[in-house]
Image (tube, helix red, strand yellow):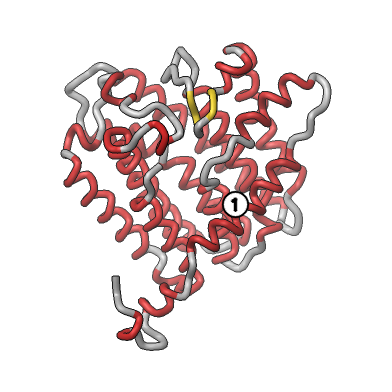
Amino acid sequence: MVATDNLTENSPESKRSKFDLKVYLKERQKIVEVALDKSIQLVYPEKIYEAMRYSLLAGGKRLRPILCLATCEMTGGTIDMAMPTACALEMIHTMSLIHDDLPAMDNDDYRRGKLTNHKVYGEDVAILAGDGLLAYAFEFVAKNTNNVPASQVLQVISHLGRAVGAAGLVGGQIVDLEMEGKTDVSLETLNFIHNHKTAALLEACVVCGGILTGISPEELQRLSRYSQNIGLAFQIVDDILDITATQEQLGKTAGKDQKAQKVTYPSLWGLEKSKKQAQLLIEAACAELEPFGEQAQALVALAYFITSRNN
């Protein structure tokens, strides 16, 4: 760590040191939690809304909505403009977790330190809760986004649809399932899985924040490269934590990848090279933000947070 006595007033290190990520995350998590709680009310039939709320409000870092808010603010927008999209992203992410945990997929009993949705409500209700969250996410963006041109809202909806469908999350998941138990999975295939299964939704979080403010195609490309890099780094760290962290730290079952005989980055590279590759991806991601200057400090800090997390 750089000693603050050696920092000049206008040095990059000095500017970064003034940004308190812990405070930023705490403030953003609080407003996201309030918005998510308001987003779904308990009405008839109560069971499905209760199941949707159970997983949506189960906690977590709220990294995806925070990335969306941070990007929108960086590019000249407001939290209010971005909040419906931020909530929708968390709804989509929650859907993917509910479905991921089902016996037909990863068959997990715990998520975010709580029993998984199907363990509480049954597999049938869990499937419907995921379906309900996915459909509602698009409705929520369309109905609640204010002070943004309709064409840009439509772009956001289109981008979300692509990120979650066969060209994104679903496509990555199907290849992941096909590769289970195989020992000859190439790095190219592993990258395909995680560029789609993990990075596609993270990319949507960042890019949609920029779409809402109407930034240029060139700037959107920079944001896309930034988020693809942090998405892959996020997955590498996830793979590392599956080996090194405890169930209490993760809030979910540890060692799942080894039990499922999944090829992961550590299984291909080893732990040390995996950590180094994640760090290189974060550095490449942050280089894409240089034209945004000091306004990008939140996204830079969030990128480095991804490689330093322990859950």
Image coordinates of residue 37 in percent, x first then y, are: 71, 41
Up/down of 114 relative to 38, above or below: above
> Is residue 152 in sight in this rendering?
no
User: In the visual, does 86 lie left or right of 179?
Assistant: right
Question: What is the quadrant of the N terminus in the image?
Answer: bottom left
Image coordinates of residue 286 in percent, x first then y, are: 36, 62
Image coordinates of residue 284 in percent, x first then y, are: 30, 59
> Is residue 70 in sight in this rendering?
yes
Q: Residue 42 or 280: which is nearer the viewer? A: 42
Residue at horizontal 30 percent and vertical 85 percent from the top: 6
Q: Residue 50 or 182: which is nearer the viewer? A: 50
> Which quadrant holds residue 237?
top left
Up/down of 223 relative to 119, above or below: below
Q: Amino acid at mark 1?
A: Gln
The residue identified by callout 1 is 29
What is the number of callouts on the image? 1
Residue at horizontal 28 percent and vertical 49 percent from the top: 278
User: In the visual, does 185 lie left or right of 139?
Assistant: left
- Describe the element under mark 1 as helix, strand or loop: helix
